[in-house]
C-alpha cells in the first residue's frame, strides 16, 4: 500500500508560511508604547509619544558594556553629515539605575549628538519583547518600519539610507 504524502507537504508549507508571517508581524509590529516614560540624562522624564513626534526617528538600544552598541553609535556619529537635520537618532540605554553616571560620562566623552534616554528598568525593552542589543529600529509616526539586531561595520550607512527613504 502506497501512502500519499501530499497532505503532509501541504501542511509543512502552511506551517512555514505561518511562521514567516508571524516573524514579519513581530519585526514590524513593534510599535513603541507612547504612554511609556523614560528618563533623560538630566533626570527629567519624557513620554515616548513626545520622543517620536518627529517624522522619522532611528531608535538604538544600547548599553555601556556592549562594545558592538558603542561601535554602531560611533559609526553613526562618523557619518553625521548623512543624517543631521534630516533624521533624529535616539539612543536608549538599557543600563540599570546604578550605571546612570557611567552612561552620562560615556556619552559626554564620546560627544554623541543623539538624544540619550534611560530605560533603567527595561520597561520599553520588555514591552517590545526584545532579547538582545544592539537593536535598532526606524520609527515613523510611532510605527516601526524597520528593525534589526546586531551590528556589522557598514550597517550604519544602510540604516541611514533606509531611514532617509521614509522621509516625506
Image (spheres, grey):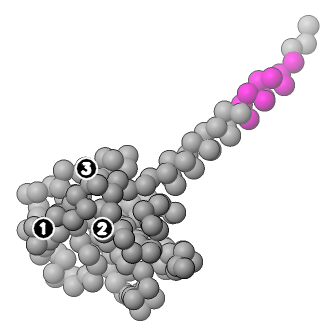
Question: Neighbour class for label 3 at 10 Å: few (<14), some, many (≥20)?
Answer: some
Residue 19, relative to residue 112: is it above or below? above
Residue 8, relative to residue 137: is it above or below? above
Q: Which mark is residue 50?
A: 2
Q: Does residue 75 appear anywhere in the picture?
A: no
Looking at the rendered image, the disc whose residue lies closer to the viewer, 1 or 3, is: 1
Looking at the rendering, in which quadrant would you find the C terminus? bottom right
The answer to whether 14 appears left or right of 41 in the picture is right
Expressed as whole percent of the image width and height from the top left, the position of residue 7 reads: 80, 23
Question: Neighbour class for label 2 at 10 Å: few (<14), some, many (≥20)?
Answer: few
Task: Identify the residue shown where x is 25% and y is 49%.
Answer: 123
Task: Answer with the quarter of the image where residue 71 lies.
Answer: bottom left
The answer to whether 28 appears left or right of 130 in the picture is right
Q: CA distance from mark 3 to mark 2?
A: 17 Å
Expressed as whole percent of the image width and height from the top left, the position of residue 22 reads: 57, 42
Q: CA distance from mark 1 to mark 2?
A: 13 Å
Upstream in sequence: badge 3 or badge 2? 2
Q: Is residue 126 magenta?
A: no
Residue at the spot of label 1: 44
Task: Answer with the quarter of the image where residue 50 lies.
Answer: bottom left
Label 2: element kind: helix
Residue at the spot of label 3: 123
The residue lying toward the viewer, choosing from 161 and 75, is 161
The residue lying toward the viewer, choosing from 145 and 104, is 145
Task: Identify the residue shown where x is 11% and y is 61%.
Answer: 99
Q: Which mark is residue 19?
A: none
The span shown in magenta is 4-13
The answer to whether 43 appears left or right of 84 in the picture is left
Looking at the rendered image, the disc whose residue lies closer to the viewer, 1 or 2, is: 2
Q: CA distance from mark 1 to mark 3?
A: 17 Å
Q: What predominant SS class does the magenta segment belong to?
A: helix
Q: Is residue 9 magenta?
A: yes
Amino acid at each position: 500500500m502506497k501512502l500519499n504524502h501530499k497532505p503532509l507537504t501541504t501542511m509543512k508549507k502552511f506551517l512555514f508560511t505561518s511562521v514567516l508571517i508571524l516573524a514579519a508581524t513581530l519585526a514590524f509590529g513593534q510599535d513603541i508604547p507612547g504612554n511609556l516614560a523614560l528618563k533623560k540624562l538630566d533626570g527629567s522624564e519624557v513620554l515616548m509619544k513626545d520622543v517620536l513626534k518627529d517624522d522619522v526617528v532611528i531608535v538604538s538600544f544600547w548599553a555601556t558594556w556592549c562594545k558592538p552598541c558603542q561601535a554602531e553609535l560611533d559609526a553613526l556619529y562618523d557619518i553625521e553629515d548623512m543624517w543631521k537635520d534630516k533624521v533624529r537618532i535616539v539612543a536608549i540605554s538599557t543600563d540599570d539605575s546604578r550605571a546612570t553616571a557611567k552612561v552620562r560620562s560615556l556619552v559626554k566623552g564620546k560627544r554623541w549628538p543623539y538624544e540619550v534616554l534611560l530605560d533603567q528598568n527595561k520597561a520599553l525593552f520588555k514591552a517590545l519583547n526584545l532579547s538582545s542589543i544592539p537593536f535598532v529600529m526606524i520609527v515613523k509616526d510611532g510605527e516601526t518600519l524597520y528593525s534589526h539586531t546586531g551590528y556589522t561595520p557598514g550597517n550604519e550607512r544602510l540604516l541611514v539610507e533606509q531611514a532617509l527613504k521614509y522621509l516625506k
